[in-house]
Image: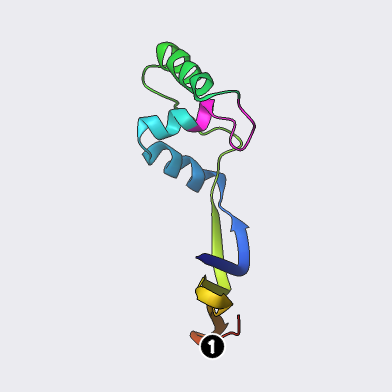
Amino acid sequence: RQVRIEGDVIKLPATVSDAYFLSRPIGSRISAVISPQSDVISSREELEKAKNAYVNEFPNGPAERPDNWGGYILSPLRMEFWQGRPDRLHDRFQYQKDGELWKIVRLAP
């Protein structure tokens, strides 16, 4: 299964990202601070050690959002849903924004 979404994206204002970050569970906030997302790491143990060290120093978790953490708003204009089927007779549906409505078509695999 695959989903592809195309549209306009804008970065949320820092104040909105700050408020959302602080509303998240403490474990999620700690992970956001200690985990270098998408970087190669040597092991899970590396993350566990970083988490434990952070919790020992800051038991109440982070009070501020890291600079590299934030949100975006996606205003979709087109979406495609793909479902694999036998013999490459896959299902593909495309939703295309047309004003306030969505035009739905089936696409050939």
Name the secondary structure under disc 1: strand
Image point 55% across, 74% down: which residue? 80
Q: Is residue 29 magenta?
A: no
> In the image, is residue 11 above or below residue 35?
below
Find residue 104 and report its horizontal and vertical position in percent. 51, 86
Image point 35% across, 35% down: which residue? 25
Find residue 92 and report its horizontal and vertical position in percent. 54, 79
Find residue 2 and report its horizontal and vertical position in percent. 53, 65
Relative to 26, is 94 on the left or the right? Answer: right
Q: Is residue 39 magenta?
A: yes
Q: Nearer the viewer, residue 82 or 70?
A: 82
Image point 61% across, 69% down: which residue? 7
For the C terminus, give its image quadrant.
bottom right
Magenta portion: prevailing SS class: loop
| Residue to which mark 1 is pinned | 105
Dot 1: within a 10 Å radius of its alpha carbon, few (fewer than 14), some, or many (20 or more) residues? few
Q: Residue 43's quadrant in the figure?
A: top right
Here the colouring is rainbow
Q: Amino acid at mark 1?
A: Val
Q: Nearer the viewer, residue 23 or 101?
A: 101
Image point 48% across, 40% down: which residue? 18
Q: Residue 89's quadrant in the figure?
A: bottom right
Q: Nearer the viewer, residue 65 or 30?
A: 30
- Numbered label tally: 1
Q: Which residues are magenta?
A: 32-41
